[in-house]
Image (cartoon, rainbow, N blue to C red):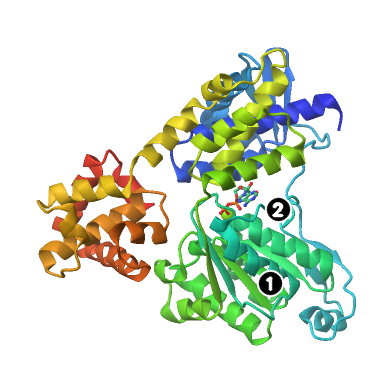
């Protein structure tokens, strides 16, 4: 890659990170993640920044939704004030790689796998759908206390797919590395055991393909395809839980894969038992395998991750700036990476300005403000506010006594601690001087009661507002 391309990639990387940091909701960020890969080329022409897309309709849509945000983000990177224009690009080759398509290759003979059988059948193809991010490998993953069990389990599965932990269910908050670990399993299997077919798919794509197969009367092909993989990696499974038809189809696929000792790996933002609308039998089967959680990284882990990224990407960032980022961006790894990218892009474009902590503080002010609101709330704050609301004391909340006048405030405080802080279940349990199961049960009980008790809902909402949070934070 020449230097000009590299710089333009850096600018675009920073724009993406800046726009993402400015979006207030998870929904908006997910939407952006779907659309931004469609913006294939990005070049500066005079005082314009021209973004190439494939379809006229995208020009219209993206101009309305993103032009102003991108212009603002560009300014933050230090390239100055540019006008953003979307244009339908010609047939020129795309400098940005498009998502990799499913490709076919020839399998080596292997008697026990589905692919051997498929290869033996005339006309059958060996399908490999590798994970999309080439750099989501074990080598690039920093093992840490917050992910140690998940990491150990994932490496064991990659060495011995279908034989050790099956299914493997990885859950945890957004941006903590679930997809990275899952993809790492896929890359490792493809590299070390190429005779096994690996299929990575998001639940959203799985659902879309299912609907397409239904409309095109191609169900048999759909089934054959997914029931014949050796390692199925299904990302964000919470997306299909609760959708009856697809859940049923997945259940059948899942059972068929289990029966033939194929490996299934799933990720989700919640534990199996918290999957809304998921059938008991499916939850039961998930729990029969290995269920592992990834938790929020500690300061030391955040710094280690930053240092590892700096080393692999050959960035030059002073230690004080890395330290500053690790101190201030605590919520998740994705935010950490976004912050690093913004700082690096700024430094590489404004070579004359030394990269100091003050420069970083200025560049990252939005993200830090976001973090502040997340960070500020502690389990203690919540207990205090809940206790005051119900006219009880914190000691009452921590007591073992099970009278209803104390149980409700106690469980509400547990519920809000789970919803409104980034603390893990064990940490919250420690603050309440209870075990995990009690806190989990308390949270679940309130969640269920909210649907049927308007008075309780009103109370919980009022406390949330008192804590300075939005009601939408409760549904996260
Ligand atoms: P999730 O799927 O949990 O939302 P991702 O797997 O997409 O999160 O991770 C978000 C980003 O953070 C990715 O770029 C990933 O490479 C990075 N990341 C997360 N955890 C680690 C880690 N332990 N070491 C290195 N990079 C990590
Ligand atoms: Mg993910």
Going 77% across and 81% down the picture, which residue do you hit?
A: 114
Q: Which residue is mark 2?
A: 136
Give the vertical position of 384 relative to 283 (above or below): above
Residue 227: quadrant of the picture: bottom right
Location of residue 226 in the rendering, given as x and y in whole percent from the top left corner = 67, 73
* Residue 94 appears in the rendering: yes
Where is ligand 2, by quadrant? bottom right
Q: Which residue is mark 1?
A: 157
Residue 137 bears which disc, if any?
A: none
Q: How many marks?
A: 2
Answer few, some or many: residues within 10 Å of disc 2's Cα (few below 14, many 20 plus, some between 14 and 19). Answer: many
N-term mark: 1 or 2: 2
Give the vertical position of 429 relative to 82 (above or below): below
In the rendered view, does 327 fall on the left or right side of 158?
left
In the rendered view, does 244 fall on the left or right side of 156?
left
Location of residue 422 in the rendering, given as x and y in whole percent from the top left corner = 41, 49
- Is the CB atom of the residue marked by disc 2 within 8 angstroms of ligand 1's nearest atom? yes
């Amino acid at each position: 890659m020449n230097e000009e391309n590299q710089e333009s990639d850096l600018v675009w990387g920073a724009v993406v990170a800046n726009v993402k940091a400015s979006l207030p909701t998870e929904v908006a960020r997910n939407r952006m993640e779907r659309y931004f890969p469609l913006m294939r080329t990005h070049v500066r022409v005079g005082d314009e920044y021209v973004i190439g897309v494939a379809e006229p309709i995208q020009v219209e849509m993206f101009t309305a939704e993103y032009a102003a945000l991108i212009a603002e983000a560009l300014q933050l990177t230090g390239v100055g004030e540019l006008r953003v224009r979307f244009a339908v690009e010609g047939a020129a080759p795309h400098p940005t790689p498009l998502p990799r398509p499913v490709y076919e290759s020839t399998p080596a003979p292997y008697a026990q796998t589905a692919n051997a059988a498929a290869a033996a059948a005339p006309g059958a193809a060996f399908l490999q759908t590798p994970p999309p991010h080439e750099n989501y490998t074990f080598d690039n993953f920093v093992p840490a206390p917050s992910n140690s069990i998940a990491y150990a389990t994932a490496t064991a599965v990659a060495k011995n797919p279908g034989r050790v932990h099956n299914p493997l269910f990885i859950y945890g908050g957004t941006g903590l590395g679930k997809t990275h670990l899952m993809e790492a399993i896929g890359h490792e299997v493809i590299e070390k055991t190429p005779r096994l077919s690996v299929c990575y798919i998001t639940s959203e794509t799985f659902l879309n393909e299912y609907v397409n197969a239904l409309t095109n009367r191609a169900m048999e092909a759909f089934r054959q395809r997914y029931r014949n993989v050796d390692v199925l990696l299904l990302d964000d499974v919470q997306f299909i839980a609760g959708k009856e038809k697809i859940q049923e189809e997945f259940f059948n696929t899942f059972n068929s894969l289990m029966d033939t000792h194929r490996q299934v790996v799933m990720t989700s933002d919640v534990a199996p038992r918290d999957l809304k609308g998921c059938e008991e039998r499916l939850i039961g089967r998930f729990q029969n395998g290995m269920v592992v959680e990834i938790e929020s990284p500690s300061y030391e882990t955040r710094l280690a991750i930053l240092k590892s990224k700096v080393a692999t990407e050959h960035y030059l960032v002073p230690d004080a700036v890395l330290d500053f980022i690790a101190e201030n961006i605590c919520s998740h790894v994705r935010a950490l990476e976004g912050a690093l990218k913004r700082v690096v892009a700024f430094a590489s474009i404004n070579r004359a300005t030394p990269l100091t902590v003050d420069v970083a503080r200025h560049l990252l002010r939005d993200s830090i403000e976001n973090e502040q609101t997340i960070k500020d709330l502690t389990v203690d704050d919540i207990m205090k506010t809940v206790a005051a609301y119900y006219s009880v004391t914190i000691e009452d909340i921590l007591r073992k006594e099970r009278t209803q006048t104390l149980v409700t405030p106690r469980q509400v405080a547990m519920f809000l601690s789970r919803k409104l802080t980034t603390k893990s279940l064990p940490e919250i349990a420690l603050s309440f001087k209870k075990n995990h199961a009690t806190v989990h049960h308390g949270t679940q009980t309130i969640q269920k009661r909210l649907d049927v008790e308007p008075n309780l809902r009103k109370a919980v909402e009022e406390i949330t507002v008192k804590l300075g949070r939005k009601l939408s934070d409760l549904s996260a």
